[in-house]
Amino acid sequence: MTFNAPNLLTLARIFLIPFLVVVLLTSVSEDWFGIGRYALAIVIFLVASLTDILDGYLARRNNQVSKFGALFDPIADKLLISAALIALVEKHLAPAWAVVVILGREFAVTGLRSVAASEGLVIAAQKIGKVKMWAQCVAVVALLVAAANGNPPVSNFGQPVPTFDFWQIPEVHQSFVNLFSFKPTTNDWRVLGYTIGRGALWVAVITSVWSMFDYFKYFFDENRKKESEF
């Protein structure tokens, strides 16, 4: 492996993941540093996400694209998002079914790409995948903002269809009234973060399924083309 800046940033992102999990799931940040766990988790997640932007930019600008980076950069991305989303499920801030769909898509597409590569077919990243990635990042940060005291700011978590019941909750109505009247409380901002986070999570789920379908369609279309040439 070449120890250039892009590869070191990729490694840094991987090494930040255990710290993110420890901060989110334990009280170490409050006990040792006197910093709220969710505030520190947001900082760690944003720093890790920034390394994802920087390593690709530096690799292209300095012509330092390597096999290590090509392999481990997407792995680091998936590990970061997986760790954050699983921790959010543990804290009752994200529904498990949505996280299973998102992570299941990642495993399926990674396996498909491996099979395609073994057949000499390179499946390039698609634009819808970028939308999925940004939706995931927005969801994680917004839900962490909503978790200022460690609990969901609304009372409908765990209901069969919480998204559709969300707007019927009195505390949500009151929070948005306060926001639009420019008299928001801290809890009103948390409700707004929760609303944005759950909305972004829906975008992430939909784009995950959509992009997975596109990947498989492209793979099977290319295989049919090869078969027709013989």
Image (cartoon, rainbow, N blue to C red):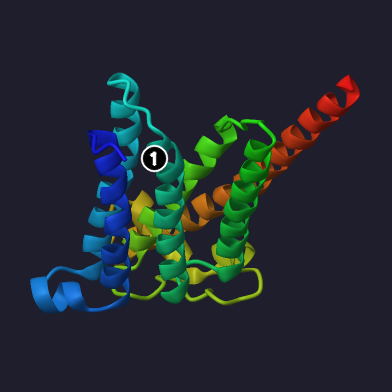
Residue lying at 32% horizontally and 20% vertically, measured from the top left: 63
Q: Is residue 69 above or below residue 61?
A: below
Instruction: Report the side of 209 relative to 27 (left or right).
Output: right
Residue 213 sits in which quadrant?
Answer: top right
Q: Secondary structure at mark 1?
A: helix
Residue 203, given in percent of the width and then of the height, sits at 57, 47
Name, please, the residue furthest toward the left: 33
Residue lying at 62% horizontally and 42% vertically, measured from the top left: 113
Question: Does the image show residue 50?
Answer: no
Q: How many dots with numbers?
A: 1
Residue 218 sits in which quadrant?
Answer: top right
Which amino acid type is marked by label 1?
Phe
Residue lying at 53% horizontally and 74% vertically, measured from the top left: 156
Residue 130, given in percent of the width and then of the height, sits at 50, 36
Of the pair 223 and 135, the residue shown nearer to us: 223
Question: Does the image show residue 79?
Answer: yes
Q: Which residue is mark 1?
A: 68
| Mark 1 crowdedness (10 Å alpha carbons): few <14, some 14-19, many ≥20 | some
Q: Is residue 132 above or below residue 173?
A: above
Residue lying at 63% horizontally and 50% vertically, measured from the top left: 111
Instruction: Report the side of 114 relative to 7 (left or right).
Output: right
Instruction: Report the side of 109 relative to 49 (left or right).
Output: right
- The quarter of the picture where the C terminus appears is top right
- The quarter of the picture where the N terminus appears is top left
Residue 99 sits in which quadrant?
Answer: bottom right
Residue 172, given in percent of the width and then of the height, sits at 46, 64
Q: Is residue 197 above or below residue 57?
A: below
Instruction: Report the side of 20 relative to 167 (left or right).
Output: left
Residue 102, given in percent of the width and then of the height, sits at 58, 56
Of the pair 49 and 204, the residue shown nearer to us: 49
